[in-house]
Amino acid sequence: MFKKLVVGALAAGIALTGGIGAASASTEDTTNSKSLTMAYSCPDYIGNGKYAQTIYNPGGTNAVYANTYTEMTCHGKIKWYFKWKKADGGGYYEGEVIK
C-alpha cells in the first residue's frame, strides 16, 4: 500500500511540473557568441630582428625542405629562409618579420 502511495505521489509531481524535460529547460539566450582564435607558433628570437626554428618533414635525413616560405606567428608574419639541414634530419630556418 505504501509503495503505491509513493509511486502515485511521484507521478503526480512529474505531471504537475510539466515533465522532467520541461522542468529543466534553459531560458537563457542560445545564440552562439563564441569567437574563434588561432594558435600561432612562437619561434625563438635570436637577436638582430631575426627568429629561428627547426622543422621536421617526413623522410628523416632524406627529407626535402623549401628554400623560403611565409608563416603567421605570434610575432607577426615571418618570411623564413632555409639555412641548413641538421644531423637529425631537421631543417633549420631563420626569418624576419615582414609587412
Image (cartoon, grey):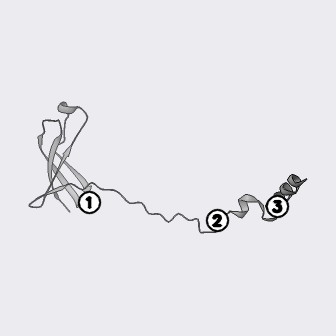
Q: Amino acid at mark 3?
A: Ala
**Disc 2 to disc 3: CB gap under 8 Å:** no
Q: Secondary structure at mark 3?
A: helix
Percent position (x, y) of residue 8? 86, 57
Indicate which disc, 2 or 1, sits on the residue closer to the N terminus: 2
Question: Disc number at residue 26?
Answer: 2
Spatial separation of the CA atoms under disc 2 and disc 1: 39 Å
Spatial separation of the CA atoms under disc 1 and disc 3: 57 Å
**Disc 1 to disc 3: CB gap under 8 Å:** no
- The quadrant in which the C terminus is found is bottom left
For this view, does 3 lie left or right of residue 53?
A: right
Q: Secondary structure at mark 2?
A: loop
Q: Residue at x 53, y 63 (%)?
A: 32
Question: Disc number at residue 15?
Answer: 3
For this view, does 86 lie left or right of residue 7?
A: left
Question: Disc number at residue 74?
Answer: 1
- Determine which quarter of the picture holds residue 55: top left
